Image (cartoon, rainbow, N blue to C red):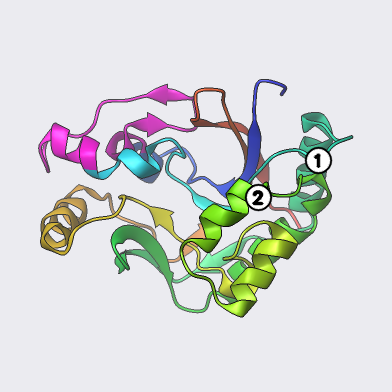
Amino acid sequence: MSQFVRFAIYYLPPDGPLAEFGARWLGWDVGVGQSVAHPTNTLREARVEEVTRTPRKYGFHGTLKPPFRLAEGTDGSQLHAAVRTLAASLAPVTLDRLRLARLGHFLALVPDGDTTALGQLAARCVTEPDRFRAPASEAELARRRAAGLSARQEDMLRHWGYPYVLEEFGFHLTLTGRLQPDEMDEVEAALALALPDLPSPYIIDQIALAGERSDGRFQLIHRYALTG
């Protein structure tokens, strides 16, 4: 796994209509590490290319442990083993459903209903493998602080390398970059037409280790069933 410069723990939808939609919409299939053509039956392809440019490199995913560099003295094989052990102790999570939502200036799929169990799962993904995370650089810290952080978010940033974890966590599968107010209705309507039928309830029964390649794009390394 030496070809990867950073690692992350993601939720990646399993193979099927939702994963296929996400790969095509973003133009990047994180599962196989390949570019794919954008859909042409909603927005113009060039328009989809533009509004998905920022999230494309990450692939269609929900972040559980944000991207990090490996700590000195650790390696990817050890991380893989630790995530496998973690997944074996985690139970699947049942959500009421996923729905399309506006999160500030971007669009994403978010869960409906009680997300307590999902938050607990994400917290363990953040904390238990954290020995593998190298401290964030000063440049990374400055970039996060530029957004304007609360005191608690600053504490999270210093302790866990990212401000939006634990009680600040909000699970979402990003679909666009930042949109202007006059763009939001058009893109939201196009997404509503393009989305496949989403299962209800929606079950999260696996997590994934993903790696950032030297070209800046993320690719699946391994999926782990939640069997706890």
Mark 2 highlights which residue?
138
Residue shown at 77% from the left, 43% from the top: 84
Q: Which mark is residue 46?
A: none
Q: Using residue 189 as the reference point, say whether residue 72 is left or right of it.
A: right
Picture quarter with the N terminus? top right
* Amino acid at circle 1: Ala
* Element marked by disc 1: loop
Residue 112 in the image: state x and y as whole percent: 41, 73
* Amino acid at circle 2: Glu
Residue 214 in the image: state x and y as whole percent: 56, 23
Is tag 2's residue or tag 1's residue first in the polypeptide sequence? 1
Image quarter of residue 158: bottom right
* Element marked by disc 2: helix
Residues in magenta? Answer: 23-50
Residue 6 versus residue 111 in the image, above or below: above
Q: Is residue 200 visible?
A: no
Q: In the rendered picture of this protein, how many numbered marks are placed on residues? A: 2
Residue shown at 32% from the left, 68% from the top: 104
Label 2, residues with CA under 10 Å away: few <14, some 14-19, many ≥20: few
Label 1, residues with CA under 10 Å away: few <14, some 14-19, many ≥20: few
Residue 94 versus residue 178 in the image, above or below: below
Q: Which mark is residue 71?
A: 1
176 or 222: nearer the viewer: 176
Residue 25 versus residue 161 in the image, above or below: above
Image quarter of residue 74: top right
